[in-house]
Image (cartoon, coloured by chain):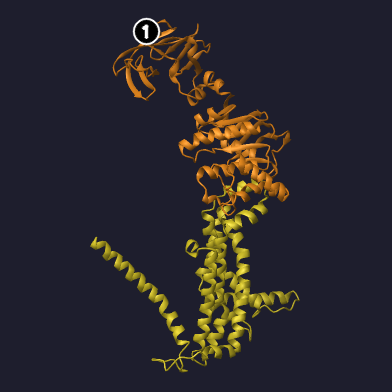
Chain colours: A orange, B yellow
């Protein structure tokens, strides 16, 4: 396993940038997740690392070696496909041995490596089966073993869990993460599922419209989102339109004067996490304290999502813990809510400047 | 409920009628091959295996059989060598000429075989004159090479169609997986693509052989003196005699084709590809 360096990588079809000026250094052993909505360029980035898409500009280095112009079969990356892409006419063992065979590894070593890879994914004894005789989860593990058996420089995962059912998905998540940590695998995973991304990654790249909007750890993204898109895509946020006034004040279009720590100027958007908002008497002593009318309630079991209208234009969703014995708000109730100045983040309006 | 069983009955009857329509000629030819009398008439005067041994003494039929087998095998190989890459190309690299190429490859099916035979014959004459013009005196008309080339032409549409059909559902990510694991495109084709589409290729080979083996119209124009294919040998025999020797030869031909299908079916389920 080795480090991966991506230097100002771009992919352009005509005038249209699918990936634009992307630079990331992935140290050895890091689990990096490319997260973004479909069409954001994350899969194209992965396919450029694997060599299936030729970059329009930029460089890719694997273990210090410039592979930008090398074809896929000379790159030494281990790719796990969304569809698993197992060879249907070969047994599990032959599938896993394929990469070793291509590298002219002796039969004895090959057998040992295949057995080891199958042991790692807990599929000992399945070697003689054909892929179609396995369940989806097992096929997924064969694909993983096949990508690992020949010791690639980097493991690439293309939405590897999207074809599994929800319960299995959570198990396999943990399994892949543990395996990755145990073997110290440098890994790049592509996903649009933020839970998956947050639970597996060391570091994440949030992508939109071909650009990396933010690169950082889960905490960086959640607590210090770089822009409105990240604030909305990672976790949930309330957004209030308005403009930043001097002295750390934000004036919403609905007329609220909100204290915030931001020094931004001009038209902007205030983002606020639902769980940062306090409800009830303790709200009164916070920097921002408002009264609003309960418009909508979603009962989610352990918590309630409550939408509160603060002004005709300003609505905020707050989360209320569902503790036993407490009186829960009803539609039409008047509710006191508040939050500290540090909880709100102001972003310039999308598209104006970033 | 009653209505459903009626429909079911009607369907069964229609299926039975179609099956009978297909099978009756086969049954009669086979039956006829064992009739005792020389001029086929009903009812049979008795049964004999004489016509099968009589067939074996007919040099023209035996030679025709060998010739048809040779031409069939070689034309099939040529058809596969051209048709499999053509199908791969058509499915993979469609561009503005893809549709045109696809239509062109199916043309031999559209042109009546008798017209095609004439056209190829004329082309062979022209080719011989052209080659002669360069000072090379080599025969083209009536050669086995010319015959094989013509047969390759008529089997090509079948090969392309059947291989294309097996490529339609082909998941291309398995080819990418092979390349990701270190296989070059050539190795990928040999180790992954061809084995996976093998049922389609085997079916294509079988069809190609059967079509070449039973072709009459095209061969009529292209065989040389004293070298005829089985269908032509049968036709020529019929011009002089109508005894059941011909029926016996047909039974052998049917048996060979049926055997080919049964053997193929052991490797690939024909119902899945055709």
- Residue at left offset 51%, top offset 82%: B250
Q: How many marks?
A: 1
- Please provide percent x and percent y for residue A257: 42, 9
- Please provide percent x and percent y for residue A274: 43, 18
The quadrant of the picture occupied by the N terminus of chain A is top right
Per the image, the residue denoted by label 1 is: A281
Quarter location, residue B190:
bottom right
Query: Can you see residue A148?
Result: yes
Q: Residue furthest right?
A: B135
On screen, residue A77 versus residue B158, left or right, reads right
Q: Secondary structure at mark 1?
A: helix
Quarter location, residue A48:
top right
- Residue at left offset 59%, top offset 83%: B64
- Please provide percent x and percent y for residue A290: 38, 10
Looking at the image, is B1 positioned above or below residue B114?
above
Q: Nearer the viewer, residue B28 or B136?
A: B28
């Amino acid at each position: 396993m080795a480090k991966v360096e991506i230097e100002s990588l771009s992919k352009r079809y005509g005038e249209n940038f699918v990936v634009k000026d992307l630079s990331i250094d992935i140290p050895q052993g890091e689990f990096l997740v490319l997260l973004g909505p479909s069409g954001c360029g994350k899969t194209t980035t992965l396919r450029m690392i694997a060599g299936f898409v030729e970059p329009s500009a930029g460089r890719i280095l694997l273990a210090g070696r410039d592979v930008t112009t090398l074809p896929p079969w000379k790159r030494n990356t281990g790719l796990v496909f969304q569809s698993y892409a197992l060879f249907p006419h070969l047994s599990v063992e032959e599938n896993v041995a394929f990469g070793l065979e291509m590298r002219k590894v002796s039969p004895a070593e090959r057998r040992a490596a295949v057995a080891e890879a199958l042991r790692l994914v807990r599929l000992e004894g399945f070697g003689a089966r054909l892929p179609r005789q396995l369940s989806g989860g097992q096929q997924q593990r064969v694909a993983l073993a096949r990508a690992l058996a020949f010791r690639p420089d980097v493991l690439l995962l293309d939405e590897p869990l999207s074809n599994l059912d929800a319960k299995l998905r959570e198990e396999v998540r943990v399994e892949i993460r543990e395996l990755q940590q145990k073997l110290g695998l440098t890994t790049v995973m592509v996903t649009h599922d933020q839970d998956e991304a947050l639970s597996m990654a060391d570091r994440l790249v949030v992508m939109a419209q071909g650009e990396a909007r933010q690169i950082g750890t889960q905490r960086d993204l959640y607590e210090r989102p770089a822009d409105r898109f990240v604030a909305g895509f990672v976790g949930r946020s309330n957004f209030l339109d308005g403009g930043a006034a001097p002295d750390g004040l934000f004036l919403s279009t609905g007329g609220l004067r909100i204290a915030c720590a931001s020094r931004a100027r001009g038209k902007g958007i205030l983002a606020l996490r639902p769980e940062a908002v306090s409800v009830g008497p303790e709200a009164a002593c916070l920097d921002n304290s408002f009264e609003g009318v309960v418009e909508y309630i979603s009962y989610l079991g352990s918590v309630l999502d409550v939408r509160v209208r603060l002004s005709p234009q300003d609505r905020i969703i707050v989360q209320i813990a569902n503790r036993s014995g407490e009186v829960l708000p009803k539609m039409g109730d008047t509710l006191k809510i508040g939050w500290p100045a540090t909880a709100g983040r102001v972003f310039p309006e999308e598209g104006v400047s970033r | 409920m009653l209505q459903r069983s009626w429909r079911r009955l009607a369907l069964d009857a229609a299926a039975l009628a179609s099956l009978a329509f297909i099978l009756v000629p086969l049954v009669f030819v086979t039956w006829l091959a064992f009739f005792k009398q020389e001029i086929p008439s009903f009812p049979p005067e008795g049964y004999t295996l004489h016509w099968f041994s009589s067939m074996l003494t007919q040099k023209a039929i035996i030679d025709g059989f060998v010739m048809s087998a040779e031409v069939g095998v070689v034309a099939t190989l040529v058809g596969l060598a051209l048709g499999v890459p053509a199908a791969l190309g058509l499915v993979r690299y469609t561009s503005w000429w893809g549709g045109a190429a696809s239509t062109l490859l199916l043309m031999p099916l559209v042109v009546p075989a008798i017209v095609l035979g004439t056209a190829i014959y004329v082309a062979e004459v022209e080719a011989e004159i052209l080659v002669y013009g360069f000072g090379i005196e080599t025969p083209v008309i009536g050669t086995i090479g010319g015959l094989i080339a013509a047969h390759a032409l008529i089997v090509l549409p079948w090969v392309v169609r059947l291989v294309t059909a097996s490529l339609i559902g082909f998941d291309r990510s398995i080819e990418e997986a092979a390349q990701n694991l270190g296989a070059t495109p050539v190795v990928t084709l040999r180790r992954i693509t061809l084995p996976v589409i093998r049922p389609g290729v085997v079916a294509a080979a079988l069809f190609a052989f059967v079509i070449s083996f039973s072709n009459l119209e095209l061969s009529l124009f292209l065989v040389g003196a004293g070298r005829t294919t089985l269908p032509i040998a049968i036709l020529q025999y019929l011009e002089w005699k109508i005894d059941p020797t011909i029926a016996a030869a047909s039974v052998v031909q049917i048996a060979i084709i049926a055997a080919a299908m049964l053997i193929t079916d052991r490797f690939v389920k024909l119902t899945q590809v055709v």
